[in-house]
Image (cartoon, rainbow, N blue to C red):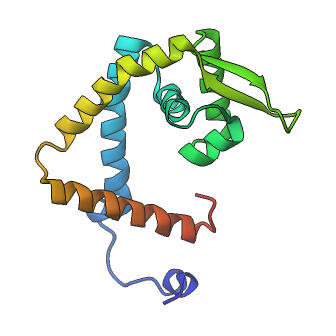
Amino acid sequence: MSVQRQLSDPPAGELKLDAYLPYRLSVASNAVSQLIARAYEDRFGLNIPQWRLICVLAEDGGLTQGAIVARTGMDKVTVSRAAQGLSIRRLIARSDHHADGRSHVLALTAQGAQLHAEVAPLALAYEAALIAGLSPDEVALLKRLLGRLQGAADALSGGKA
């Protein structure tokens, strides 16, 4: 069945918010993000977008802000604000893009890489605590299903999710 057909021919039934999957995903995501945000802010002075930017740069090396937007799903303004804050703290550095004079490449400084090395174990510990009640097969299934849901959302939005 096509996406347009699914949307134009909605299923019958009553909407119950607590049973509505998009709502449940949002509530779960917010709960996890708020938990981790408090830890990053309290211990390292980082907000979630700043931490995501640090992680992406640690994994991928230097990237343009456009590449960071595409990789993280964060909007341009959020990436720009995160980059500004990290730059002020000298955790990232900005350099000219070799092929595009209008663009800049962001990369971790040595101080930024050190901070990533300190925060990453905490991030992994939170993940381990969150999934402690799940079997390895359930974790793998959850990751696959989340990937499929994200793909479906991307398809429904025409790739602009």
Name the residue rendered at 57%, 46% in the picture.
71
Q: Is residue 117 above or below residue 79?
A: above
Q: Quadrant of residue 25?
A: bottom left
Q: Quadrant of residue 83?
A: top right
Position of residue 65 in the picture relative to residue 1 (left or right): right
Q: Considering depth in this image, is 22 or 1 the residue closer to the camera?
A: 1
Instruction: Give the x, y percent position of residue 104.
Output: 77, 30
Which quadrant holds the C terminus?
A: bottom right
Instruction: Give the x, y percent position of residue 77.
Output: 67, 34
Position of residue 53 in the picture relative to residue 95 (left or right): left
Name the residue rendered at 35%, 45% in the picture.
29
Q: Is residue 90 above or below residue 61?
A: above
Q: Is residue 95 above or below residue 23?
A: above
Q: Is residue 144 above or below residue 92?
A: below
Q: Is residue 18 visible?
A: no
Name the residue rendered at 56%, 70% in the picture.
155
Name the residue rendered at 29%, 24% in the picture.
122
Instruction: Give the x, y percent position of residue 118.
Output: 36, 17
Instruction: Give the x, y percent position of residue 57.
Output: 55, 31
Position of residue 129 in the picture relative to residue 123 (left or right): left
Q: How many marks?
A: 0
Q: Is residue 95 visible?
A: yes
